[in-house]
Amino acid sequence: MTVTPGLRLGPYEITSAVGAGGMGEVWRAKDTRLDRDVAIKILPAEFAENAQLRTRFDREARAISALSHPNICTLHDVGSATADGESAPISYLVMELLEGESLAQRLARGALPLADVLRYGQQIASALDAAHRKGITHRDLKPGNVMITRSGAKLLDFGLARTATEIAPISGLGDAPTARLPITAEGTIVGTLQYMAPEQVEGLPADARTDIFALGALLYEMLTGRRAFEGTSKTSLIAAIVSAEPPAAAELVPMTPPALEHVIRKCLAKDPDGRWQSASDIAGQLQWISETAISRSGEIAAARRSEPKLRRALPWVAALVLLVAGLAAGRWLGGSTDSAASHVQASVALPAGTQLAGWGSPAIAISPDGTTIAFVASREGKQQLYLRRLNEPDAKAVEGSDGAEGPFFSPDGRWVGFGAGAISGRSTEPRTLKKASVAGGPAQTVSSIADYFGGSWSEDGFIYFAQVDSDGLWRVAAAGGNLERVKIAGSQPLSMRWPQILPGGRTALVTLIPGGKKRELALLDLSTGMVELLNIDAPFGRVAGGSRLLYVDSDGSLFAAPFTTKGNAAGPAVLIASSIALTGNGAGAFAVADNGTAVYARGYVQGSGRELRAPVRVDWSGKETPMGFEPDTVAQMGLSPEATHLAVTTWKQDLFIYDIGRRTRLKVTRGDSLGRQGPLWSPDGSSILFTSETAAAMNIMRQSADGADEPRMLLELERGEAWPSSFSRDGRWLAYYVVGSSPEQVAWEVWLMPMDNPAAVRKLAVGYAPRISPDGRWIAWESTESGRW
């Protein structure tokens, strides 16, 4: 029979589908007796008629019922029921409903941070130990059978589990697939062979040590983002499992603790006698590594080293806590490793009560000699620049730095420059370019500017910076003076962000925003104005010493590669860290000094909107219901007039329509325009407005809600940004706000558009985020005319 929402199985009412595997469908259901949501696993009718598969389903029920552990999915009930009009009963298991994502889904985005590998690995090992003590071998440990929830990892699917009392395995189940997944090429292999121990693929009996082999494969994949064993066919994969060794994890992830490498290698021993003999021992080892290999936030252990060692070593200081790790540069740049080089692992705590902040520019900078860091942080709504010498205990706020954005150091490290009066800081000051002495004292104004998207201080005494326009870069003498536009070759205007002047002062690394395309790294020749795209897929990067390129991709992964201004990224990239904080415009929260010292932040940047949470629906009792979006993907949302649908824009530049009742979503645009934000429904629900970035400006687009046609331009600017804010209830008027539409416009302006004649727009006031009242008689907006917002 077909299972659909509304079906009753005893006291359980099916509400929506969750997923499906080889042994059944999983549904969300309501337990009408206890008024709680549960997960129901239903044995399909065609499986119920198969004695072997029926036995496997019953085995799962017995196995889970014997286990009680915080990292194992709880079994609530088991039963059989006959639906109305049906003759055959439906067998089902009622389990704990887990909110989160499978480990397989998480791994699809890449390797996990070391802290998560150790945490989840310890929890999985502890769950396996609990099962093994009950005489139960899982036999199908794989990423798809581990759920990542708020409380940690949960082990699922004991359908292939075997108890110590079983005399013989069921024929054909030893390699039965629980999901059909290709290994390296479509159709080459199915099932979970990648995680099977040698004795399993050879058809020999399995015991607890078989699960330990699979755990080693799981740890390896979580750490490196690659499977331990791969092959182009079933035969080659089996050969790899039986006789080959995977590459050392440290070759792929240079910061891998040796103790963790040892744990994984011992798990993956070909001979069961050579493996760890207890999952409890593995859990203990991972706990010890997590306590000794990861430095605690709020503490700093910085060592003074000689200059030769500094040039060979790459210590990492990380923050957001500014979190730290260290390794020799040769390890990840493919050069020779100097065993004498220093390695530093430390954390730099932010000042009490502050949070890393920023919207349009990088929030962190480090001095060329790697001894001082500058960062922007917010406390009680006040956004300031802070300086911290690594040999001193505390960071100090820079006087006169309200509304600071995007710090950068002078070549000699004696000064730090930054933008001020930025919108994200909600400062009432006009926007300016400022500098402050690292030795102390208030900030000094260099020049008034229209806007600010990062800056860089060149060796010849000029400061180069980006504004919200389509004319490349600007520069001004650090001592003050007139603004000069940097020459750009060609007639096509180019919008640039986050410049870094490279050693020698002849080349700038910039983020380029071509018309209708994503952000791309490029090199700008400052003498000729020629622009050359780099051969990497990344929106933001920084060069250390002219030879090392660090860059962050759109998912927040930090990579390093050898670099030359002639050959661009000349060599393979190595993953350094994951979950790097990103600002709202995609700038990574990291910086690197000339000597290789780097600082980076994990988590999110306040003001960026990139809190690592997925959107949920909340009822009046406070109960949350997930909406099927992954964490850290949604930018903004807009509710339809009837509150039946939600328009959702994502950081990957897509627009989705989410049906709240059916819990389904439809992608109505593709990632062909940058900066989609602010989805605003028309009063009749037929269309949606959003902002889309082109090479020239950020314009207002109109898209049909059903996705039947392409987006159409509603308001096009020659430069600047326009954001839709509010419709009148009758749909006759649109209120929106604009900034940067002319070189003189440095404040947001409120505009009104008659929808029957979109060209007849008129400006109402200086202000921000207008809203039209329900009766259409009034408009409210934010303003700074009183001296504050």
Image (cartoon, rainbow, N blue to C red):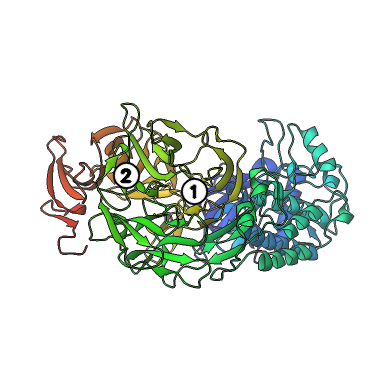
| Amino acid at dot 2 | Arg
**Which residue, as the protein is rendered here, is positioned at the far top?**
491
| Amino acid at dot 1 | Pro
- Using residue 770 as the reference point, say whether residue 223 is left or right of it: right
Which dot, 1 or 2, sits closer to the camera? Answer: 2
- Using residue 734 as the reference point, say whether residue 270 is left or right of it: right
Q: Using the image, tell me which numbered label, if any, was put on residue 640.
A: none
| Pick the front one: 297 or 229 | 297
Q: Residue 693: which quarter of the image?
A: top left
Q: Using the image, tell me which numbered label, if any, was put on residue 5.
A: 1
Q: Position of residue 209 (x, y in %)?
A: 82, 56
Q: Using the image, tell me which numbered label, if any, was put on residue 475.
A: 2
Q: Position of residue 601 (x, y in %)?
A: 50, 58
- Using residue 444 as the reference point, say whether residue 145 is left or right of it: right
Q: Secondary structure at mark 1?
A: loop
Which quadrant of the figure contains the N terminus?
top right
| Pick the front one: 141 or 340 | 340
- Mark 1 and mark 2 lie on one chain; the one further toward the N terminus is 1
Characterize the local packing of mark 2: few (<14), some (14-19) or many (20 or more) Cα atoms within 10 angstroms.
many
